[in-house]
Image (cartoon, rainbow, N blue to C red):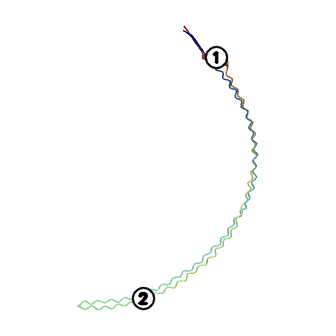
Amino acid sequence: MGESYGLTPEVNNDVRSNNDVRSSNDVRSNNDVRSSNDVRSNNDVRSNNDVRSNNDVRSNNDVRSNNDVRISNDVRSNNDVRCNNDVRSSNDVRSNNEVRSNNDVRSNNDVRSNNDVRSRSKHPLSNAAALSCNMIEDVH
């Protein structure tokens, strides 16, 4: 039995990739924010309170008790209540508010990006290596 099997596949892979990626970014931002804040508060609060109370309370109680199965009650009450209340309140509240804000915010951003990406790939497969790996001989 003398049989021989010879396999000779040929694989040629030529992969080429040329990538030229360029990005130019010019970002500019000019922000001028101005705020003028002048805060003034003039508060004049005045309170004049005149509270007067004149109370004249009088009580005349004449209680007489005679216990001879007689009860004589002479109850006299003279109440003179006088109340003179003079309440005065003068409130002068003044508020002058002037708000000013001076804010100068400046931002100058110059962002530049130049990207050059290049890739070249070549992967050859040797035929001799393929032949040496795929030769099978069976000699009897």
Label 2, secondary structure: give it. loop
Q: Amino acid at mark 2?
A: Asn
Q: How many marks?
A: 2
The location of residue 26, given as percent across then percent down, is: 76, 46
The location of residue 12, given as percent across then percent down, is: 68, 24
Find disc 2 in the rendering and name its residue: 79
Residue displayed at 66% across by 16% down = 128
In this rendered view, identify the residue nearer to me: 105 or 52: 105
The location of residue 135, given as percent across then percent down, is: 60, 15
The location of residue 84, given as percent across then percent down, is: 52, 85
In this rendered view, identify the residue nearer to me: 3 or 88: 3
Q: Is residue 96 above or below residue 14?
A: below
Please tell me in which quadrant of the rendered image residue 44 appears. bottom right
In this rendered view, identify the residue nearer to me: 59 or 2: 2
Q: Is residue 25 above or below residue 71?
A: above
Label 1, secondary structure: give it. helix
**Is there CB contact under 8 Å for labels 2 and 1?**
no
Q: Is residue 94 above or below residue 78?
A: above
Find disc 1 in the rendering and name its residue: 131
Please tell me in which quadrant of the rendered image residue 105 appears. bottom right
Dot 2 alpha-carbon crowd within 10 angstroms: few under 14, some 14 to 19, many 20 or more = few
